Image: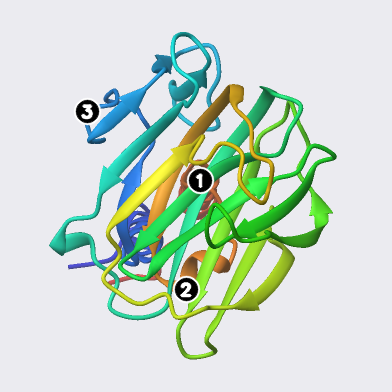
Amino acid sequence: MRLTPFLLSMLLLSTCLAEQQSTLLFHDGFEHGLGGWDEAVDCSLSAAESYSGNYSARLGFRRFSVQYLMRRVGAEEQPTGSFVFEFHVKLVRSSMEAVTLAALVFPTGPVAVAVSKDGRVSLGFGLFEPPVYGGLKLKRGVWVKVQLHIDYEGERVELYLDDEKALETGLRGRTLPLQEIWIGTIWLGGAGGYGMVMEAYYDDVALGGEELLNPKPPINLIAAAAASAIIGMEFMPLPPS
């Protein structure tokens, strides 16, 4: 069978897609609602904002002092070593205090991503433990990619904003299995003086291997490149069979 330009480009596209998806243990872009989460408090599906696709999860104050989504991590989604937790967030409004954005819960305690009232990102390891602050600020009103790298080999935790390292600190004995994923308001008060997320949007929440730290082109750009290859190759003369 001769590999035509079309078959070659489709092979390229399928290979790229497989590489992007091979390390994912869990992903939710909220295109099918909030059914993939075990608990949802003051959270709704939004078609007004999205990082990709048509929908995002909107967290906002309506009835309760905390606004969050929580998901228990199943056995088939468990990382077996170092891993990356990734989400995209658009923080619109919050109370005047610092606020948590997301957290991972382990048997030995949580690791929470937070932002101070002046915008500095931080990591928290307990409600009554002082947070560890980084040097980068999270911009409000725009979509930001946040990545939490749990590095068991290096015994460290790294936090990235839009592929730029914001801070690094010790792992503090956080051991597998990973029990729960939280996004939104996790704590109130405490050593970090945490407050409420008044309005925020979340999209493309993912759990996967360390390959997530290496930026890859969006799938729509890969498809466009494949289409361009088809067009270009169709006008190339094929050698005689």
Residue 90's image quarter?
A: top right
Q: Which mark is residue 102?
A: 1
Q: What whole-number distance in Å separates the C-alpha atoms at marks 1 and 3?
A: 18 Å
Locate the C terminus by quadrant.
bottom left
Q: Amino acid at mark 3?
A: Gly
Q: Amino acid at mark 1?
A: Ala
Q: Amino acid at mark 2?
A: Glu
Q: Are marks 1 and 3 in contact (CB under 8 Å)?
A: no
Q: Is residue 187 above or below residue 217?
A: above
Circle 2 residue: 210
Circle 3 residue: 35
Give the SS element for disc 3: loop
Q: What whole-number distance in Å separates the C-alpha atoms at marks 2 and 3?
A: 27 Å
Q: Is residue 222 left or right of residue 109?
A: right
Q: Which one is earlier in the sequence, the residue at label 2 or at label 3?
A: 3
Q: What whole-number distance in Å separates the C-alpha atoms at marks 1 and 2?
A: 19 Å
